[in-house]
Image (tube, coloured by chain):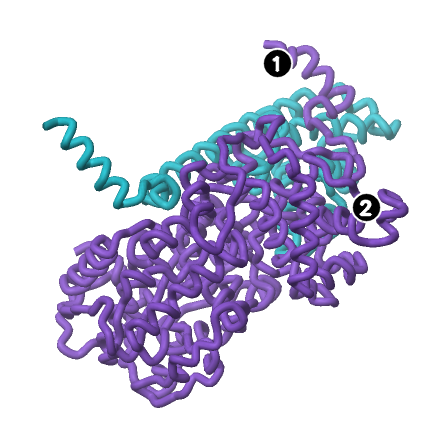
Chain colours: A cyan, B purple
């Protein structure tokens, strides 16, 4: 059996384990795993869709630039949740572990473990692309903060009372004179 | 370097087991997981000068003024803080029958559990409305029920500790009081009111956030959140009128604090000051000019928003009272309200028992169509969308939809107008008449079931940007759907906090979607007598 055929045959098993592990990184993952309604469960469904598409692209030996869309679907969410940067992108690398687990559990596919080098490299490339996306997301958040500061909303909380400012100005003036 | 995982260890972990990398979180009972404050997951505490000022005001109380930091172990609570909290809870159980019922009647059916945008964005069980309420309910059980007094933890009770104060602070400020969960509760428990009680109790021991008390202070002092002086407030509106003149050729000279006007117009101060809300304000100005409305602005009641709602009932009452005091002083007949969210919750659900009935005003009657707004017969305050829809219905506006041809819109039901006053059809009716192309988001995300922007109740502050983005994910996810499917490029709404925070939310999740008020689109489409309108490719936003 060729490696790519094995990965195709075992697709459901691999994806199910991979997605479950990823969603297990949440404190209360039950609903995220269960609900298939995209609008009721945006975290669970987007992560499921993104990882599924990414897996299909890896099997089809798609170009690295094509990873961006499914990766964005997953990483954009994790970039604003309470994960360290490593935890946010780690699900991508976990695919290697999941694939090895699944292939080694079946005696027919066990010999293929030695052929995983190229697949592993592709996963690594996807993980690096995920890191780029993570950084872009974080950069965007900082820009959003700056945008809000510039838009002047900070005076909501940090401005002094106008009358106090007038008092301060007149005190400053009297000091100068 | 101690924290950096060695490369070989990392490689081995990938092969042997991924827990090192995912940091898989141990599953414990929610009661046993303490909260951890770190930058980005909490709002900054109130500035002592702000809190001190408020505490000195008559009729309200914000004690225990001090510098403190949520990340510190010691929050510098009063020595008798526990007594204060328990007495405070007792007082509120006595005063608010709803609270007593909400504490007792939940059967933990779980219908609300997966309806909260914060739970959906975080996966944190304490953001399930039922569990958020349980943070208070467990203390209630321990101290106010026989079973709890006798059996303690076995009866779901918890002894009040500083760890619980910290937990309350964390989760009372991860609830935007949007009330989506209440729609699904078979008992109609209003979890927002539980959050309101939690925040009130926290204020008793001096635990509050600057982004709530800052605007409250400004409103109390200068009349609006922004702290704009009367001169600045008027100056900003004059400036918008100058812009309108160069865009449309129409010269508008609105009046301020004018006694004897028929109508007092009140809107969030952000409409006067902040982008993109100013374009909504330009829409109001054009509309009133088009129909020749006899109205006045007030530089005293210069704020529709009421952050008192997010603070304490006394503060809410005081800030709400100002609008009616000004209506009385000016001798207007009724009040027209702009596109604000929580102002309408305060007016529709609390005003009448706090400051009403407003007997000195008349039941609102449109001077243009003669329609009597019986629905506002007690509060005497009409929503701009109701008012505009009525004008359109009677054919009083000359509208050209093609002036919004650059717009493919969807409509976000702002939480409070939708769920607290049932304003569902009017903005849609207006949209039907001013835009050619607009599309609804999926049914489970609009109308009464609308998802919150994730930044309401004074959570629209930058230090918790990540929290806001994850809280807003369910809303953004539905916008993305219509953006991908119908090329939607504009998210219309009827709330000033929405206009500010959805803008940032869209930039992150659905770039290419702008946010606007419904009245901005009305302003774009209005054909005015005597206009000398330029080519406005982007409506009132066009730079000329």
Q: Which of disc 1 and disc 2 is earlier in sequence?
A: 1
Q: For the C terminus of chain A, which image quadrant? A: top left
Of tags 2 and 1, the one toward the viewer is: 2
Task: Using the image as rendered, state which of residue B327 and residue A151 is in the foreground.
Answer: B327
Which residue is at 26% across, 64% downward?
A: B282
Label 2 in the same subunit as label 1: yes
- In this orientation, does residue B63 appear? yes
Bin the neighbour count of mark 2 within 10 Å (Cα to Cα): few under 14, some 14-19, many 20 and up.
many
Q: Quadrant of residue B407?
A: bottom left
Which residue is at 32% across, 53% downward?
A: B222
Percent position (x, y) of residue B174? Answer: 59, 46
Q: Which mark is residue B4?
A: 1
Residue corresponding to mark 2: B157
Q: Quadrant of residue B7?
A: top right
In the depicted structure, whether residue B198 falls above or below residue A14: below
Task: Using the image as rendered, state which of residue B374 and residue B152 is in the foreground.
Answer: B152
Q: Tell me if B21 is positioned left or right of B317 in this view.
A: right
Instruction: Give the spatial CA distance, label 2 vs label 1.
Output: 42 Å
Q: Secondary structure at mark 2?
A: loop
Q: Secondary structure at mark 1?
A: loop
In the depicted structure, whether residue A174 falls above or below residue B475: above
Mark 1 chain: B
Q: Quadrant of residue B184?
A: bottom right
Percent position (x, y) of residue B27? Answer: 79, 35
């Amino acid at each position: 059996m060729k490696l790519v055929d094995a990965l195709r045959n075992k697709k459901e098993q691999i994806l199910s384990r991979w997605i479950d592990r990823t969603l297990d990184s949440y404190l209360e993952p039950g609903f995220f795993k269960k609900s298939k309604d995209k609008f009721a469960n945006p975290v669970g469904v987007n992560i499921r869709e993104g990882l599924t598409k990414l897996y299909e692209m890896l099997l089809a030996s798609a170009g690295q630039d094509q990873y961006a869309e499914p990766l964005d679907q997953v990483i954009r969410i994790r970039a604003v949740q309470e994960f360290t940067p490593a935890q946010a992108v780690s699900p991508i690398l976990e695919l290697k572990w999941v694939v090895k687990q699944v292939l080694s559990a079946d005696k027919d596919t066990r010999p293929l473990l030695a052929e995983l080098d190229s697949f592993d490299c592709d996963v690594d490339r996807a993980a690096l692309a995920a890191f780029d996306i993570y950084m872009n997301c974080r950069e965007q958040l900082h820009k959003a903060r700056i945008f809000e500061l510039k838009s002047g909303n900070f005076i909501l909380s940090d401005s002094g009372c106008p009358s106090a400012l007038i008092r301060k100005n007149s005190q400053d003036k009297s000091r100068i004179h | 370097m101690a924290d950096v995982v060695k490369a070989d260890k990392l490689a081995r972990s990938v092969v042997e087991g991924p827990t090192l990398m995912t940091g898989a979180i141990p599953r414990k009972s929610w009661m046993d997981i303490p909260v951890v404050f770190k930058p980005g997951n909490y709002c900054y505490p109130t500035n002592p000068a702000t809190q001190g000022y408020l505490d000195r005001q008559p009729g309200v109380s914000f004690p225990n003024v001090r510098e403190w930091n949520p990340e510190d172990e010691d929050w510098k609570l009063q020595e008798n803080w526990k007594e204060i909290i328990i007495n405070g809870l007792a007082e509120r159980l006595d005063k608010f029958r709803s609270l007593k019922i909400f504490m007792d009647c939940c059967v933990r059916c779980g219908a609300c559990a997966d309806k909260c945008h914060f739970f959906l964005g975080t996966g944190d069980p304490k953001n399930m409305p039922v569990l958020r309420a349980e943070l208070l309910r467990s203390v209630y059980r321990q101290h106010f029920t026989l079973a709890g007094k006798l059996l303690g933890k076995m009866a779901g009770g918890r002894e009040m500790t500083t760890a619980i104060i910290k937990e309350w602070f964390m989760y009372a400020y991860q609830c935007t009081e949007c009330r989506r969960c209440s729609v699904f509760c078979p008992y109609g428990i209003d979890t927002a009111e539980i959050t309101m009680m939690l925040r009130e109790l926290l204020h008793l021991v001096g635990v509050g956030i600057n982004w709530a008390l800052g605007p409250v202070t400004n409103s109390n002092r200068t009349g609006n959140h922004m702290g704009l002086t009367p001169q600045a407030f008027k100056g900003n509106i004059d400036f918008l009128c100058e812009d309108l003149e160069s865009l449309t050729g129409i010269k508008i000279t609105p009046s301020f604090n004018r006694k004897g006007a028929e109508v007092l117009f009140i809107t969030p101060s952000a409409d006067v000051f902040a982008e993109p809300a100013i374009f909504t304000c330009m829409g109001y100005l054009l509309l009133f000019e088009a129909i020749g409305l006899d109205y006045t602005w007030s530089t005293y009641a210069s704020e529709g928003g009421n952050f008192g709602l997010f603070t304490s009932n006394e503060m809410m009452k005081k800030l709400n009272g100002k609008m009616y005091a000004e209506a009385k002083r000016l001798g207007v007949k009724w009040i027209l309200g702009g596109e604000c969210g929580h102002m309408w919750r305060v007016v529709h659900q609390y005003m009448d028992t706090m400051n009403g009935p407003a007997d000195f005003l008349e039941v609102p009657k449109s001077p243009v169509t003669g329609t009597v707004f019986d629905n506002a017969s007690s509060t005497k305050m009409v929503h701009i969308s109701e008012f505009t829809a009525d004008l359109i219905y009677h054919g009083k506006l000359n509208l050209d939809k093609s002036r919004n041809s650059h717009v493919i819109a969807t409509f976000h039901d702002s939480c409070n107008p939708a769920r607290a006053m049932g304003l569902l059809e009017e903005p849609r009716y207006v949209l039907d008449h001013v835009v050619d192309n607009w599309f609804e988001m999926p049914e489970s995300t609009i109308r009464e079931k609308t998802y919150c922007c994730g930044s309401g109740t004074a959570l629209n502050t930058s230090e918790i940007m990540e929290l806001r983005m994850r809280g807003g994910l369910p809303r953004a996810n539905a916008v993305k759907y219509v953006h991908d499917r119908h090329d939607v490029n504009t998210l219309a709404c009827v709330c000033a906090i929405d206009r500010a925070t959805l803008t940032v939310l869209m930039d992150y999740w659905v770039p290419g979607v702008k946010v606007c008020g419904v009245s901005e689109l009305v302003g774009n489409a209005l054909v005015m007598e005597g206009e000398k309108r330029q080519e406005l490719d982007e409506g009132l936003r066009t730079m000329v």
